[in-house]
Amino acid sequence: MTDRHLTEEAFILLATGDCCDDFRREAASHLQSCARCQYESQQVYKIFGAIEQASEHGLLCLPRERSTKSLFNWKKSAFPWVPVGSILGASVVVIFAILGPFTAPSASASELLNRAVINERQFGAPGGFDIVANGVRCGHGGSAEKTLVEDSPTCQQVKISLNETPWAAGNPLAATTFRAWHASLANYRDTVTKLPALWTIDTSTSSGAIRNARLTLRKDTYQSVRLDLLFEDAENVTIEEDDQPIANAPLTAIAQTRPRAPAIQASSSVDLLEVQGWQILHNLNGDTGWEATVTRRGDSVIVRAEVPTPARKQEFEMAFASYPRIVLNVYEYGDSNAVPDFLPRRVNEPDGAPPLAKKWLDERFPDPGERSQFVNSTVKLSKEILGRVYVLEELEKRRTALANCSCAHALDSLIEAEKTDLRAAQESLRSSLEPVVGAPQHASAKEITVAGAQRLDVGIVRLFFTAPLSGDVTLDGEESAVRKLL
């Protein structure tokens, strides 16, 4: 009688899933009628399952070339083949698989990349992809193009960063590009992880613009579905598979070929970094003029801030965490190290006389609480105007200074936002002051300079808060000065 049983390698291939459909069907048919092979198969599955759960690297059961020897054992014996040898063989293979990542991890990564490239040559690279940075969808494209769809400082930086890498040309999801970059590295470390339906290849290196790249492959086809790039300046860019087209997208193409020499000078990169600093400051509502500002010192971009609470300080630190090249100096009020010379200057007149409009205030607001509320809100509006004008003038100066950088136009939206907030504050102040200083001379709020905003602030403080002791400051004079500036 001839007994036909599965070999050790056959059980391992079934356990890892690394076998063709024809063999899987043939093996399944045999297992239905062979109790001994069923038992042996269960033991191998248990071994692989336990080891995979315990493995941090997930490098078990790596795909390998099909053996040329038969996947079935033929024995001319009536006595059944005892599965002890098979179980022992499977255990030995598993032990070597565990030790493998520590001895030659690059070989495993190379094998996966080779399989991905073979699949790519046969079926093609992914048809569509998205480019995402810091939660912003910056681009979408196909195998022959990349298109920026967001004209923001973040996306401009993505364009610059990608143009300095091999992923600037062709389809960035192509495994061929990853393998070529991987092969060019002199010093690197690979980590391969096996997930239920995916493989990931993490490659870290200490040189070049890219410090870490992760390629994610489908387990069944080895097709690449996602690429994560970590740049030297800690910028993260993700490119992921997406077959949905974007209609009516502005076309600002990333370079289709890798430049022979850097096309972007360092100064332009620093200019872009400064614009990003202003944008983040605006998103934090920190561009009021009284909390923070962005400054340049040579090729350094510095954000200086003085904040009221530890929680606010943490907001700044979290917002700028993705931009380690921006120097962040944030202090809390009262910190002895803080020197808030970056804030606009208010003219203080301590130990003054009662406010010039005291009589009007007492008549208009007999209730002390209402009177105090009016004074505080009016003085606060004056302070807001001074701060907004201060920031607006600074942004306009920087817009002129960065005129040669393609990033400069990104400041235009910030300038318009500051103008909108400034006009709203001016209109509120005009309405508040008309009963005491009379109707403004202009139909709408006029443009105002920092010097004018400082003079307006002085006049409002003298009218409603405290007046100087000198007798040359009069109620009529201050009302006239304020009215002209509204």
Image: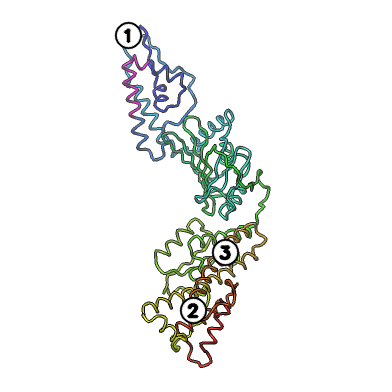
Q: Are marks 3 and 1 in contact (CB under 8 Å)?
A: no
Magenta region: 30-46
Amino acid type indicated by mark 2: Pro
Of circles 2 and 1, which is in front?
Answer: 2
Circle 2/circle 1 CB separation < 8 Å = no
How far apart are the alpha carbons under marks 3 and 1? Answer: 83 Å
Q: Which residue is the site of mark 2?
A: 435
Element assignment for label 2: helix
- Coordinates of residue 64 in the picture (x, y in percent): 48, 28
Q: Is residue 359 magenta?
A: no
Whether 223 is drawn above or below 404: the answer is above
The dominant secondary structure in magenta is helix
Q: Nearer the viewer, mark 2 or mark 3?
A: 2
Residue at mark 3: 300
Q: Position of residue 371 (x, y in %)?
A: 40, 79
Chain-order first, disc 2 or disc 1:
1
Image: 70 above or below 348? above
Q: Quadrant of the C terminus?
A: bottom right
Residue 101 spot, x, y in % from top left = 44, 38
Q: How many marks?
A: 3
Residue topped by disc 1: 78
Q: Nearer the viewer, mark 3 or mark 1?
A: 3
